[in-house]
Image (tube, coloured by chain):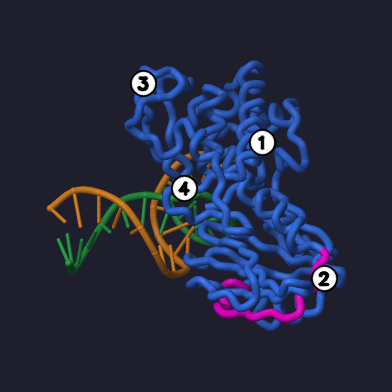
Chain colours: A blue, B orange, C green
DNA sequence: AAACAAACCTGTGCGC
DNA sequence: TGCGCACAGGTTTGTT
């Protein structure tokens, strides 16, 4: 579910609501959520610790603790973080509950029906060993800043379909299925175009499109689809879905040219929507 | 090197 | 109404 803009929205919520608070007590239900280590490791790593910051790299949330360790949360497909008043009824699939210090008494919940998401406390000094996936993450267009030259090198350095390349977290971190399709449409590039065939002008368009789509989506608080799965820390949905021009619009008229219908293909193992007239 | 399929799970929507 | 199948914001692993 959540891609860079949704994770960034959650991060901002954590910054306002959770940073500076101490975790008094931790309950871990489903062990699968903490499969990288164990229930005990998460409880021991968080209990008594104060969250000192909320950072993001790609789709990874990274919260440094005053113990020197760091909490990593990845929402994967269906994970949600929610702040709620203590004692509020917990929704189904609430796998981790963190009791926070301060008034009013509140809890930070990790909810995840599909259980692909995960939480882990790790020592940042051992990043390469404990978190190899995180260590190999590519450039984050927002936090690292992605220059045109950088993107040019990424594209020219390989011979891959744009869809697969942009979604590869080891290359560009944070772009998922929605924002990939939306960026390619804005850039007027087909998802199956081969990366090293782009002209300088096209590279420029793609660079502008990725940054503009991600920035606008962050401003809109991300995309909340019909299933309302994604909500921010306070349970509020985002609004970027009203700006989607191709995602989930197969068979409908292209909003840009008004002449062709949006087409759906499978690319990089994912449902991919584009306008065959606008995108070349 | 890159494309593809399957795996991990649960829930929902659709056709019959 | 109910059943079975396809599919879903992600990532890893193994195979061509």
Q: Is residue A63 left or right of residue A73?
A: right
**Which label sits in the foreground, 1 or 3?**
1
User: In this picture, which residue range is highlighted in magenta?
Assistant: A20-34
Report the Cα–Cα distance between label 1 and label 2.
Answer: 30 Å
Identity of the residue drawn at 48% across and 65% down: A114
Both on one chain, marks 3 and 2?
Answer: yes
The residue that label 2 is drawn on is A50
Report the Cα–Cα distance between label 4 and label 3.
Answer: 24 Å
The residue that label 1 is drawn on is A215
The image's mark for residue A18 is none
Q: Position of residue A85 (x, y in %)?
A: 64, 71
The image's mark for residue A225 is 4
Identity of the residue drawn at 56% across and 38% down: A179
Please tell me whether mark 1 sits on a helix, a strand or a loop: helix
Pointer 1 or 2: first along the chain: 2
Report the Cα–Cα distance between label 2 and label 4.
Answer: 34 Å
Q: Position of residue A93 (x, y in %)?
A: 50, 72
CB under 8 Å between callouts 3 and 2?
A: no
Q: Is residue A161 visible?
A: no
Q: Is residue A234 above or below residue A107?
A: above
- Crowd rating for badge 4 (residues with CA inside 10 Å; few <14, some 14–19, many 20+): some
The residue that label 3 is drawn on is A260
Both on one chain, marks 1 and 3?
Answer: yes
Q: Is residue A100 left or right of residue A29?
A: right
């Amino acid at each position: 579910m959540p891609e860079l803009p949704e994770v960034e929205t959650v991060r901002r919520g954590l910054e306002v609501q959770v940073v500076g608070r101490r975790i008094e007590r931790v309950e871990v239900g489903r062990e699968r959520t903490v499969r990288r280590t164990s229930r005990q490791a998460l409880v021991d790593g968080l209990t008594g610790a104060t969250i000192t910051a909320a950072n993001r790299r790609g789709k990874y949330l990274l919260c440094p603790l005053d113990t020197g360790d760091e909490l990593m949360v990845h929402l994967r497909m269906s994970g949600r973080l929610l702040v709620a008043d203590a004692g509020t009824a917990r929704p189904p699939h609430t796998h981790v509950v963190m009791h926070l210090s301060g008034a009013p008494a509140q809890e930070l919940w990790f909810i995840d029906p599909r259980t692909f998401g995960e939480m882990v406390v790790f020592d940042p000094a051992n990043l390469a060993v404990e978190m190899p996936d995180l260590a190999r993450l590519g450039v984050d267009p927002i936090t690292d800043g992605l220059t045109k030259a950088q993107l040019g090198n990424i594209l020219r350095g390989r011979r891959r379909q744009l869809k697969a390349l942009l979604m590869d977290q080891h290359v560009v971190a944070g772009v998922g299925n929605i924002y990939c399709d939306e960026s390619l449409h804005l850039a007027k590039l087909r998802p199956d175009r081969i990366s090293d065939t782009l002209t300088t002008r096209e590279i420029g368009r793609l660079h502008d499109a990725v940054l503009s789509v991600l920035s606008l989506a962050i401003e809109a608080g991300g995309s909340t689809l019909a299933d309302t799965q994604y909500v921010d820390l306070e349970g509020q949905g985002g609004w970027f879905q009203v700006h989607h021009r191709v995602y989930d619009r197969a068979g409908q008229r292209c909003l840009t040219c008004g002449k062709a219908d949006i087409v759906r293909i499978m690319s990089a193992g994912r449902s991919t929507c584009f306008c065959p007239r606008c995108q070349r």
